[in-house]
Amino acid sequence: MAVRRSQRKREHPDLGILSGRTLFGVQRELFGAVAGQGHAELRPRHGAVLAYLDEEGSRATDLAAQSGQHKQVIGTLVDELVALGYVERQPDPADRRAKLIVPTAKGLDEMAKSDAAMAAIEAELAATVGEEAYGEFKRVFKLVADGLSARRPE
């Protein structure tokens, strides 16, 4: 009798399954942590903006490129974050035609709390598997992610 696909995927997960489990697990822990610190209205989709946003502001095109999302998706997420009070659009002093997405005080608070929560998650994982193994995992995972990103048509 052949092994069922679901069993095979459970016993020998491929890169997509492992990446998905990693992403969803990190999102669950990260957004749970910041929700308990006053940011319960945020959802994982908002990470496409907040994870890459610079304190002094970022252009939407840069956020799209860094996150791998379409500019229209970033625009929708920015609209949501403006409505929630996390960011605002301001003229870009370097180019009057462009807008910067700039974090508000609430956005800066969330960014600091999410950075601290992410550092805690990573420290716990490193302690679980060992600092050296975790460092090597991140090094190789970055190589794989960079390699896949480079193959993506613009």
Image (cartoon, rainbow, N blue to C red):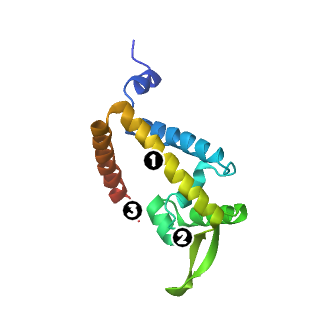
Residue at image point 64% right, 66% down: 105
Q: How many marks?
A: 3
- Residue at image position (57%, 64%) is 74
Q: Of the residues tagged 3 and 1, which is closer to the observer?
A: 1
Badge 3: few (under 14), some or many (20 or more) residues near its Cα, within 10 Å?
A: few
Question: Residue 23, relative to residue 149: is it above or below?
Answer: above
Please rate how many residues cluster around mark 1, counting C-alpha atoms within 10 Å: few if below 14, some from 14 to 19, many from 20: few
Q: Quadrant of residue 36?
A: top right
What is the CA distance from the residue labelled 1 to the residue labelled 2? Answer: 26 Å
* Disc 2, SS: helix
Mark pair 3, 2: CA separation? 19 Å
Amino acid type shown at disc 1? Ala
| Mark 1 or 2, nearer chain start | 2
Task: Please name the residue that numbered disc 3 is placed on.
Answer: 153
Instruction: Indicate which label's residue lies in the foreground, 3 or 2.
Output: 2
Q: Circle 1 sits in a helix, a strand or a loop, which is it?
A: helix
Residue 35 in the image: state x and y as whole percent. 65, 46
Viewer can see residue 144: yes
Label 1 vs label 2, nearer the camera: 1
Residue 62 appears left or right of 139: right
Disc 1 target residue: 119
Q: Quadrant of the C terminus?
A: bottom left
- Image spot of residue 77 (x, y percent): 62, 61
Q: Find the distance from the CA under tag 3 to the CA under tag 1.
A: 32 Å
At label 3, the amino acid type is: Pro
Determine the residue positioned at 37% across, 56% down.
149
Residue placed most toward the observer, 71 or 81: 81
Q: Residue furthest right?
A: 83
Q: Disc 2 residue type?
A: Ala
What is the number of the mark on residue 60? 2
> Residue 76's spot in the image, x, y percent?
64, 63
